[in-house]
Amino acid sequence: MSHVVDKDEIINGVYNGTGRVLDGPIQPELLGYDEEIEGLDQDIDRAQQLMEEAGYEDGFDINIVTNDAPERVDVAIYLQEALQDINVNATVDQIEWGAYLEETSTGDHDIFILGWPNPTGDPDQSVWPLFHSSMEGSQGNRTFLENGRVDELLEAGRMTTDEDERAEIYEELQEVLVEEAPMIYMRQALSMNAQRSEVDGLYINNYNKPDFRDVTLSE
């Protein structure tokens, strides 16, 4: 399924060109980001080949659930159409936010569309809640991934304080998570901020945290 998605088309068509494509679960600003990592790009022939190898050359039915956020609904509709290329017949269910969170926490869903913020700036926040087996369900791991190597790497990333060692740990983790593909690493959102012309000295960091300490106002 990862191979049927054109991430650039989603960013340009759904998000009006805002954001950037991700190849894995860790964004470029974070410790351990691997710029050499190769994501699963759109490749319909490869997707069809994998379907055949898995015994699903005739396809199957699947359900996509999303809440009522307009962009997520549009992404769901895009996926519904794109999956037809590999004979996957998808239906889209748009449900209320509370019910949506409840449904995706049970493990009974097929595909869901959701985002995950990183307010701390540490790679652990991007990956531990989403992929450690202890976090299954409402705590964050809504894909219900259970992978021993992923757990080992995540735990090692928390145990060491050496930045070089941590960087190596998260680089390997990205490789495993791209190969396992528990989710489609679609887009990193970029915040759009505006300020009036008389405001000087405002600094907003990569995590959208404003620093007002040096702000001055001119007439």
Image: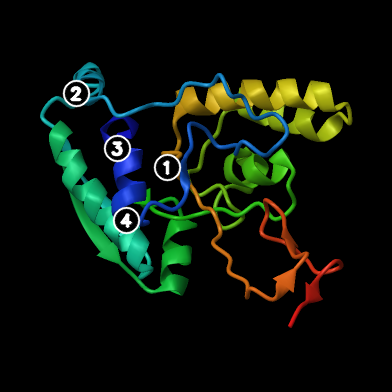
Q: Is label 2 or label 1 in front?
A: 1
User: CA gap, disc 3 to disc 2?
Assistant: 13 Å
Question: Is mark 4 in CB contact (under 8 Å) with mark 1?
Answer: no
The amino acid type, in three-letter code, at marker 3 is: Val
Distance CA(mark 3)–CA(mark 4):
13 Å
In-front residue for pair 200/51: 200
The alpha-carbon separation of the residues under discs 4 and 2 comes to 25 Å
Which residue in the structure is indicated by mark 4?
A: 14
173 shown above or below 8? above
- Is residue 68 toward the left or the right of residue 47 in the image? right
Quadrant hosting residue 99? bottom left
Residue on which the image places disc 2: 48
Crowding at dot 1, Cα within 10 Å, few <14 / some 14-19 / many 20+, comes out as: many
Q: Which quarter of the image is occupied by the C terminus? A: bottom right
Task: For residue 87, say whether it is visible.
Answer: no
Residue ID at (44%, 53%): 18
Cβ atoms at labels 1 and 3 below 8 Å apart? yes
Give whichever of discs 4 and 1 has the lower sequence position: 4
Query: Closer to us: mark 4 or mark 1?
Result: 4
| Residue to which mark 3 is pinned | 5
Q: Earlier in the sequence, mark 3 or mark 4?
A: 3
Residue sitting at x 70%, y 55%: 119
Marked residue nearer the N-terminal end (3 or 2): 3
Tell me the residue at 69%/38% (across/down). Answer: 30
Structural distance between the alpha carbons of marks 1 and 3: 9 Å
Q: CA distance from mark 2 to mark 1?
A: 20 Å
Check disc 4: other Cα within 10 Å, few if <14, some if 14-19, many if 20+: some
- Numbered badge on residue 186: 1
Position of 144 relative to 219 (above/below):
above
